[in-house]
Image: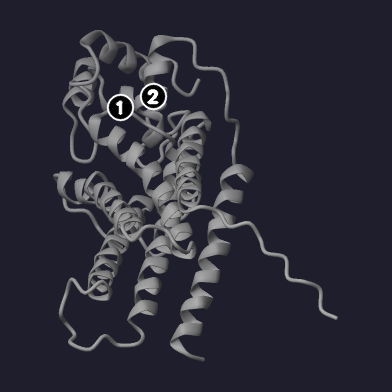
Amino acid sequence: MTFKQIVRGIEALALVAALVFVVLLFANDGGGGEAAPASGGAQLYSANCAGCHGVDGGGGLGPALAGEVTTAFPDIEDQITLVSEGRGSMPAFGGDLSEEQLRQLVEYTRTDLGS
Amino acid sequence: MAAPAVESPRLSTNTKLLGVLLAGAAASVLLGVYADSHTPSGEKPYTLFFSDTIQLKAWFATAAVILAVVQVLLAMRIYGKLDWPKKVPPWLGDAHRLTGTVAFLVSLPVAYHCLWALGFQSGTTRVLIHSVVGCIFYGAFVTKVLSVRMHNLPNWVLPVIGGLVFAALVVIFLTSSLWFFTSSDAPRPIF
């Protein structure tokens, strides 16, 4: 088998992989077009946090929040500070969200998230 | 008696160029629409031998960028912008295609997790740039692959589109892997 044939084979594999990629995206689509969450805190969570912490707060790239944050942050102000200033790989949202939005978001994670 | 050959209508250069550009734009828009409308799963579907999906993504994206740098260097030799090696080996073109193909393959698990688990996000400037350029990258890649197979396109098309693909990949890397490697306070296990 020549180098050219190997390259052509890998190109064919890439084409198949691209097709599988598209099929999997739609086959595993768990519900696009769902109604937006009603509350402001839920909307803020969906837009800013759900990607890493999971739609239901069960964790993903970031740690689980639902049922956990009140233990980790007994004082809500500590949690607001973390969300505002960030820590480690957790980005800071203080520049993007107002103080009121930060509080709405944090209150949502402490009361309604995952329920 | 053989039937007379039917000459297929030839598309003009501009029509071909418009076609490949529209195909790429459509791919970018479709990915963006999917990422925005799909409800992110937030799941971590695979880790391979890495300690976490994000480690896998960061290192796969790094591998894709390294392969892309090699591909650009090979392209520069093919186009005569580099003088080394003195004699162009006959396999150089195939090596150029191979590095690009493998870079694309390596990028797919990364993009799949971004689209399926995270979706289009705009929480911070970095994330917004990453989301937008991620969609642009695959559109530019589609245009590049189609351009390679089209004949009679203007000479500037391939280098320009190839440059766009490379630039987009570098931006994606800077706004994800490099950010990940440099933003952590604590050392992160790789495997």
Q: Amino acid at mark 1?
A: Gly
Give the number of marks. Answer: 2
Rendered view: A77 above or below A4: above
Q: Residue B191's image quarter?
A: bottom left
Disc 2 and disc 1 in contact, CB within 8 angstroms: yes
Could you say where residue A89 lies in the image, as x and y percent from the top left? 23, 40
- What element does badge 1 sit on? loop
Residue for badge 2: A47
Could you say where residue B72 lies in the image, as x and y percent from the top left? 26, 66
Q: Amino acid at mark 2?
A: Ala
Rendered view: B106 above or below B118: below
Residue closest to the eye, B18 or A4: B18
* Residue at the image point whose x is 49% and y is 64% from the top: B149
Residue for badge 1: B123
Q: Could you tell me which chain the residue with mark 2 belongs to?
A: A
* Residue at the image point whose x is 19% and y is 30% from the top: A86
The answer to whether residue B109 of the structure is visible from this angle is no
Compared across the picture, whether B124 is left or right of A42 comes to left
Q: Crowding near pointer 2: few (<14 within 10 Å), some, many (20+)?
A: some
- What element does badge 2 sit on? helix
Could you say where residue A68 lies in the image, as x and y percent from the top left? 36, 28
Could you say where residue A100 lies in the image, as x and y percent from the top left? 25, 8
Q: Could you tell me which chain the residue with mark 1 belongs to?
A: B
| Cα–Cα gap, marks 2 and 1 | 7 Å
Residue closest to the eye, B95 or A10: B95
The answer to whether residue B27 of the structure is visible from this angle is yes
